[in-house]
Amino acid sequence: MQYDVIVVGASFAGASAAMQLVRARRTVLMIDAGQPRNRFSDASHGFLGQDGTPPHEIMAIAVEQLMAYPSFELVVAYAEQASADADGASVTLEDGRHFRARRLILATGVRDELPAIPGLQERWGQTAIHCPYCHGYEVRDRKLGVIATSPHSTHQGILLPDWGPTTYFTQGQFEPEEAELKQMCKRGVVIERTPVVRILGSAPEIDAVELADGRTLPIGAIFVGPRVHMSSPLAMQLGCAFEQGPMGPYIRTDDMRQTSVANVFAAGDAALVFSNGTMASASGVMAGVSVHRSLIME
């Protein structure tokens, strides 16, 4: 074996896993393609001790600290293929380089798919956002909108009045159930059943939304639940089992972050039904600790 552990993905989850392992004096190869999910955000919020810090700055410090450990290596490249067997796992890069380790941690993240509404994509991570706990405070007291993308969007609509006056756009598809409608009405949420067809204003700011009937409504920030897809094909290639979450599939793991495939663990957004920076980092810590224990018990 070339390494004790290969970690694919160098964002919050992957770096947190690697830190546990190098501090346990294990040889770790981290592979990263440099396309983290959080690259569209200017700041990470709600992360203890890092509130307001750009995600790329947090990760630059993390990698610098990891590089201080002699058993750590970093390769910046796209991991194209992976396989696992009873002895360990192998990863092949797009340039043909091949690596093998006793354990593999997938911290490969997910890719967000937004509704095909003009003006939405270029504002993603700025004024078109998903998590009120991550970004709600920054758009507080603006007129807020929720563009429904699934039945779970009603929960956004119920939460958001704590940050600002809220309009819930059903898009003609996701009508609140009776109990949800009562909660929304109690919290002052306006229900708009005509679909949003365009976001207006000079990006990244939002001035208003245009509706299918030609009306425009003043809105200062949009909350929208994207569909998520695996950023990497490795989990599928390995045969990992998946669960179906409200936003899309995620890798099934046990409480110790072990996947359904021997010697393969997973952490971060690719293996969490709900996630933010703190949850991703915590799952990475658990993956790193669990992998170390599995190596000891081998």
Image (cartoon, rainbow, N blue to C red):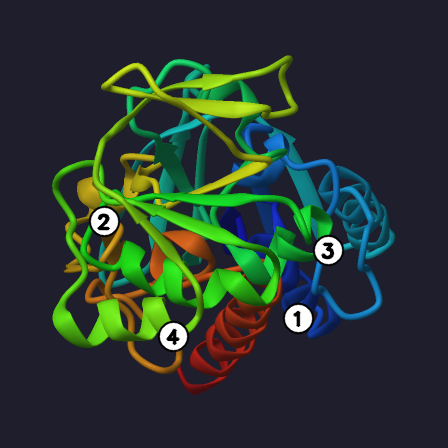
- For the residues labelled 4 and 3, say whether their Cβ atoms are less than 8 Å apart: no
Query: The disc labelled 4 sits on which kind of residue?
Result: Lys
In the figure, residue 231 lies in which quadrant? Answer: top left
Q: Residue at x 71, y 57 (%)?
A: 45
Q: Secondary structure at mark 2?
A: loop
Q: Residue at x 16, y 49 (%)?
A: 174
Query: The disc labelled 3 sits on which kind of residue?
Result: Ser
State the residue position of label 4: 186
- Disc with the residue nearer the chain's start (1 vs 3): 1
- For the residues labelled 1 and 2, say whether their Cβ atoms are less than 8 Å apart: no
- For marks 2 and 4, give the CA distance: 30 Å
State the residue position of label 2: 248
- For marks 1 and 4, give the CA distance: 47 Å
- Disc with the residue nearer the chain's start (1 vs 4): 1
Q: Which mark is residue 20?
A: 1
Determine whether, in the image, residue 240 is placed left or right of residue 23: left
State the residue position of label 3: 71
In this rendering, the label closer to the viewer, 1 or 3: 1
In this rendering, the label closer to the viewer, 4 or 3: 4
Q: Secondary structure at mark 4?
A: helix
Q: Is residue 1 visible from the viewing direction of this image?
A: no
